[in-house]
Each structure stands twice: as C-alpha cells, then as structure tokens.
Image: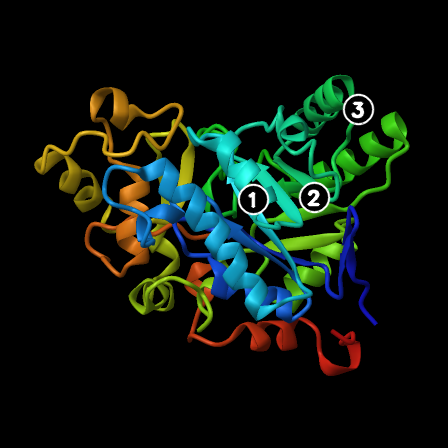
C-alpha cells in the first residue's frame, strides 16, 4: 500500500499536492475535491478578488483578501476534514496580507514560491499549526531559506517543493537561458536538498517533486528517485472540478506539444504557457492603452513602462474563457490531455484499488 504524506501536523492518505494555479484555476472546487480524495488541495491566492462579489474595480487588495477567506470556507464545505492550503506568490504586492488572510481563513499549509519566502515564518508566527513549504529549484535556495528561517525565527520548513523549470507550468524560478538546455537535474536537486537537510539540520521532512508529473508512471519514477511526494497542477486542470472555464480546459485538450513554450512575464520571470495567442495578449492591453489597473506585482514591467501585458488580468480573462486575449499557463505535459475527467478518476489512475488507502 502506498505511503501517505505528512507535512508538519497534517497528514493525507496519498503523496499528492495539487499545484496552486492562478488566477482562480485552482480555487475552492478543485482544492476541496483533491482534499476530499486524500491529497493536499491548494487554492492559488493571486488575483482571487477579480472574480468575486467583493471587487468593485478599485479595491483589488481588499477584495483579494476577502475572496481568499471565502474560497477557503467553500473548500472546507467540500472536505471538512481535508488538508487544504494556499499557494502564495512572493512576487505579489500583497504577499504579506495574503499569507495572513490564508492563516485567518484556516489554511493548514502555505506553499510559497515565485521568489524566496524569507519572512514567511514571521508572518505566520501566531499560527504555529500552519505548515510552511517553500518552493525552490536549487540546493542553494534551500540553504538560504533554512539559514534565514532558523536565525530569524527559530523555524525550519515543514517540507520543500523542488520545481523543475524544464517541465512546470506558470512562473518558473530559473533563468530562461538555462531552461530546456538539459543542465537542470530535478531529482539530483531533490536528493541534494534531502542530504542538506539531514546533514546540516538533522531534519527529515518531505521533499516534493513538482513539474512533469502526469500519470502513475511519472509518480512512481519520482518516488523511486527519492521524492517523498509530487505536486501536480496541469493534470488537475482537465477535471470537471477545476475552477477554470470549460474553454480553458478544452484548450489543453486541443493543444499540441509544439503549442507549449516560454513567455517572459512582466514580473521578470519566465513562464510556461500556450503561446499561439501571445501577440494578442500583448496587443490587447497596449491597443486599449490600459494603465496598470491593480498594482498586483512588486516588480512589473507593465506597471512601470507598459511592457508586455498586465498579467493578472490576462490570466483572469483566460480563466473566464477568453482564449483570444487570455494568458493560458500550463505545464509541459498539457498536450497529453485527451478529455475532461474528474479528480476522483485522477486518483484512481494514480493509485489502483489494491493500493488505495481509506480516506
């Protein structure tokens, strides 16, 4: 029988974290149903307010906070006893507020990337039961985080996610010139992080592989290579429970391998997406002469000089079904999608009946 996953004080039956995907691609429905099936469900905090009743066009940050609390409540209505967490991007302007709102809303896990979450333990000091999980792409990044957290907060991570920039979707924590060159070895990094944690800190915590995990074969390979679990995002997009519009999901089903590529985000990070419409994404904001409407990112080329496009609104349009001018983030395996299934079917394929744990 497959081993489950324990992160901090929270345990689930299966070693699966559903990746946090914004804007509202992974909201309450997806996170709640993943948790209901025995994995860890993540709500992506970024831009949640845009699709909420709280947003009036001018109160982006206030709406974001309240929408996150609302989404957590709705997710727990689906899986009252589940492990539901939040993905919080360091790059967003309201990162601190998002983390605190996640804690207030009952998140059991906070997964944090798109930058190094150096102050995460300080933000969550009043919520010691919340498990803290940074995302890294190198042993060096894990070392920096551990030293800072230990020195500043007497805290170490409860797990670490190692993201593979060659396969993961959305924003990637690596220089674009390195991605896809074969220089990066994800499982060497996984093993390196595990060795560092044990040798330096005598710490045995889960190290999770993220990126490129689509099916049971990929899961088994990750576990055999030393990962304690996997984070999957792209596979869960093509489920009925995913919070994105059906047109978004169908774009995955219809895409070919060559449709998936890298774009440069106005956040200054490369990202993996469906690239066929990227010129329309750029032109939409430029042609309409839209000035930065939200200030969502700490660092943004569009905010300062109208370069590229407004990413949070481009992602929002895609989530709502605009396949012409919406930005469609995806992982490298999106082309493998053949149909829209259910979260339960994903778990049944990953874990055959004879291996299934009681949930």
Residue 102 badge: 1
Q: Which percent across, then down, holds residue 130?
A: 70, 43
Q: Reply above or below: 225 against 78.
A: above
Residue 154 badge: 3
- Given the current orientation, which residue lies at the most extreme top position? 151
Alpha carbon of mark 2 to alpha carbon of mark 3: how far? 15 Å
**Horizontal side, residue 290 vs residue 216: left or right:** left
Is disc 1 in contact with disc 2, using a CB cutoff of under 8 Å? yes
Q: Quadrant of the N terminus?
A: bottom right
Q: How is the image coloured?
A: rainbow
Q: Which percent across, then down, holds residue 337?
A: 44, 68
Residue 130 badge: 2
Q: Which percent across, then down, holds residue 117?
A: 60, 29
Alpha carbon of mark 3 to alpha carbon of mark 1: how far? 22 Å
Q: Earlier in the sequence, mark 2 or mark 3?
A: 2
Assess disc 2: are there few (<14), some (14-19) or many (≥20) residues with their C-alpha within 10 Å of its C-alpha: many
| Residue 275 in view (yes/no) | no
């Amino acid at each position: 029988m497959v081993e489950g996953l324990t992160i901090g004080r929270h345990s689930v039956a299966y070693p699966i974290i559903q990746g946090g995907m914004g804007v509202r691609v992974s909201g309450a429905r997806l996170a709640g149903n993943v948790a209901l099936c025995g994995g860890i469900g993540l709500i992506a905090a970024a831009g949640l307010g845009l699709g909420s009743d709280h947003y009036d066009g001018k109160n982006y940050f206030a709406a974001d906070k309240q929408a996150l609390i609302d989404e957590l409540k709705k997710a727990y209505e689906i899986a009252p006893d589940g492990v539901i967490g939040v993905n919080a991007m360091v790059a967003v302007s309201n990162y601190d507020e998002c983390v605190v709102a996640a804690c207030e809303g009952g998140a059991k896990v906070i997964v944090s990337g798109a930058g190094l979450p150096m102050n995460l333990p300080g933000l969550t000091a009043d919520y010691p039961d919340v498990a803290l999980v940074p995302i890294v792409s190198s042993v060096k990044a894990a070392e920096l985080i551990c030293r800072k957290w230990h020195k500043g907060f007497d805290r170490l991570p409860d797990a670490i996610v190692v993201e593979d920039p060659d396969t993961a979707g959305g924003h990637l924590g690596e220089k674009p010139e390195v991605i896809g060159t074969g220089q990066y070895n994800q499982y060497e990094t996984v093993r390196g992080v595990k060795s560092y944690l044990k040798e330096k800190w005598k710490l045995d915590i889960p190290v999770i592989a993220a990126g490129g995990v689509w099916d049971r074969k990929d899961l088994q390979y990750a576990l055999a290579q030393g990962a304690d679990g996997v984070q999957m995002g792209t596979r869960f997009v093509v489920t009925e429970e995913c919070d994105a519009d059906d047109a978004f999901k169908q774009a995955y089903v219809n895409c070919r391998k060559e449709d998936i590529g890298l774009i440069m985000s106005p956040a200054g990070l490369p990202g993996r997406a469906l690239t066929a419409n990227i010129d329309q994404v750029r032109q939409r904001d430029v042609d309409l002469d839209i000035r930065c409407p939200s200030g969502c990112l700490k660092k943004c080329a569009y905010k300062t000089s109208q370069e590229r496009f407004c990413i949070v609104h481009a992602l929002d349009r895609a989530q709502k079904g605009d396949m012409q001018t919406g930005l469609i983030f995806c992982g490298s395996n999106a082309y493998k999608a053949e149909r829209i299934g259910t979260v339960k079917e994903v778990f049944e394929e990953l874990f055959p009946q004879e291996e299934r744990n009681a949930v």
